[in-house]
Image: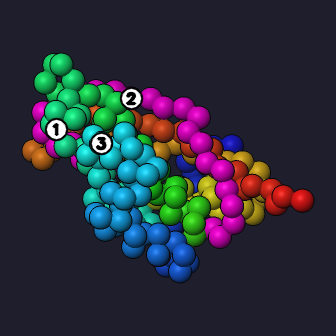
Amino acid sequence: METPASQSPTAPTALSPSAELLRHRIRYPFAFATWSLLKLPSAWFTGVRLVSVDTQRCVAAVPYGWRSQNPFRSTYFAAQAMAAEMSTGALGMLALEDAGVPFSILIVDMQASFGKKATSTATFVCEQGAVVFDAVREAKATGESRTFTLHSVGTLADGSEVSRFSFTWSVKPRRARS
């Protein structure tokens, strides 16, 4: 069930100790690089990095270079998609850790549009942390799955927009094993 637009989502002002520890760990380049090498090797290889994350917003970046470029001398769309997904997925990881119970999370839809060639580092920003935290709280309270759509906009250093992504995520509390 998609979160209604009429509701005013609210992100927590303080995270649980385990969620704060996760946020602390993924903010440090070495710890994040090690994690991404083990869990997301293609993102690690292309140089996707998490710039910042808190309960409201997440910023990820992908550099322009030989590991992320296409034959047309711009950043390959898949590399842009990885950075955009990371800017939404890190918010999901933080919300799920904050919930304190096991969840499953899955992308069920993705849409993208491209406006300009990315010929330098592209930065992707998602500012919908409150939507994620609300959906996870509701799923935890009801035990039912919830879907929500997060948007990430990629820009170059000069502010020009290179792409927009929309990811629809589904979260569902896992049942305890008998």
Q: Residue furthest left?
A: 158
Rendering coords of residue 118 (x, y %): 18, 33
Look at the image and tell me whether residue 139 can be seen: no
Q: Which amino acid does label 2 sit on?
A: Ala
Give the magenta range.
99-126
**Residue 113 place in picture, x, y as percent:** 34, 27
Q: Does the magenta stretch include residue 83?
A: no
Pick whichever of labels 2 and 1 is earlier in the sequence.
1
Gap in Å between the C-alphas at discs 2 and 1?
Answer: 19 Å
Q: Residue furthest top?
A: 71
Q: Please, what is the dominant secondary structure of the magenta stretch?
A: strand
Q: Where is residue 5 in the image (x, y as percent from the top left)?
A: 55, 47
Disc assigned to residue 64: 1
**Residue at x 41%, y 58% (from the top left corner):** 35
Is residue 113 depicted above or below 173 in this figure? above
Would you name the residue on which mark 3 appears? 45
**Residue receiving disc 2:** 112
Q: Which residue is drawn at 47% across and 69% down?
A: 22
Mark toward the viewer: 2 or 1 = 1
